[in-house]
Amino acid sequence: MNPAFWRGRSVFLTGHTGFKGGWIALWLMYMGAKVYGYSLSLPTTKSFFSETRLADRLAESVIGDIRNLSAMTEAMKRAKPSVVIHMAAQPLVRASYLTPVETFETNVMGTVNLLEAARQTETVDAIVNITTDKCYENQEWIWPYRENDRLGGHDPYSSSKACAEFVATTYRNSFLAEANVNLASVRAGNVIGGGDWADDRLIPDFLRALDVGQTLRIRSPNATRPWQHVLEPLSGYLLLAEKLVNEGAGFAEGWNFGPDDCDTKPVSWIVEHLCYRFPGSKWELDGTPQPHEAGLLKLDSSKAKSRLDWSPNWDLETALDKTVEWHLAWKEGIAMADFSIQQLESYLDT
């Protein structure tokens, strides 16, 4: 990654108030980019965005809905971005069962609106569209999914993200390629890191239970996921954006940014590691009926390793340690923007 590429470059970032969005906004500003955020208000009472006071550092922070095409187009034209990074989404599997219409409206039509707004903004050179590892049609097999595997989804979230992939392909082929706007879609694993307070996510749930002295209840201890620190896929997204601008259409396609295979672990491994770190903490099985979630999911990132020279810096144990360190620093009242930048610099020095 070349920090000089980002210095002074205008970036339009949707979902900047979210967990991943906040981390990438901080990283972009650390490199000197001018970040224009467009997102709904804070998704949780506490958030990475609020605790690091990112609003004070952004070129502009617009609280808006990606389902509102005219408002997003106006904000994008005002930003005059070279790079657009689309992170705004309804990001939770279990929530998608409760709000399927909102999930499809946000993840599908929100993506349509984002790409349509980019079509109408003459300064855009490249778009990075963030989807998910769950966009693949899950076969519950032991092999990791590659970018050319079939897309699909059992639950509304996964299905909506597969649809967003189809939307991206259609816009690339029908409109953006001929306008010399290079669009790539990216798929990451289960990201962890400091500053995530979302409901129904394993690490935030563990830390909440720990803080109040409760026993953590686990739905699916044998569910196996590709865990990775949030900085891992973000490094891939930023590297890919540079390639899209500097080297063009050859990189305008789908990309996986997952952990090494050895870091694809069951939920039980994660909680046992955390319980060992915090003696006295406990977990138990939640035996109540649950909606369907994938049991086994892995990503093949061979293409990113080969063509982008990208690879993970931190193994899973390091990622968990960094996540816990962030939470403990926050509890001590440390300035979290500075602490987050220290973690970023540690990641870059690895």
Image: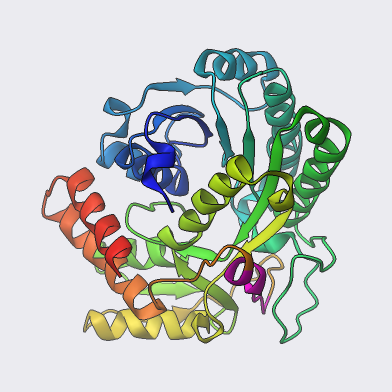
Q: Residue at x 20, y 47 (%)?
A: 336
Quarter of the image for residue 118 reads: top right
- Residue 141, placed above or below residue 109: below
Q: Magenta segment, which residues?
A: 295-306
Q: Which residue: 69% across, 79% down? A: 144
Quadrant housing residue 85: top right
The residue depicted at 44 percent of the width and 30 percent of the height is 9
User: x, y percentage for residue 334?
Assistant: 12, 49
In this orientation, does residue 84 appear?
A: yes
Q: Is residue 45 visible?
A: no
Count of numbered circles in the view = 0
Q: Nearer the viewer, residue 297 or 343?
A: 343
Q: Where does residue 13 sit, x and y in percent of width and height? A: 51, 33
Q: Quadrant of the N terminus?
A: bottom left
Position in image of residue 195 (x %, y %): 33, 52
Q: Is residue 255 above or below residue 63?
A: below
Residue furthest to the front in view is 247
- Asked if residue 277 lies in the magenta stretch, the reply is no
Indicate left or right for 122 with 199 as reference.
right
Q: Quadrant of the C terminus?
A: bottom left
Q: Position of residue 214 (x, y in %)?
A: 30, 69
In the depicted view, which residue is nearer to us: 280 or 43? 43
Q: Is residue 142 above or below residue 121?
A: below
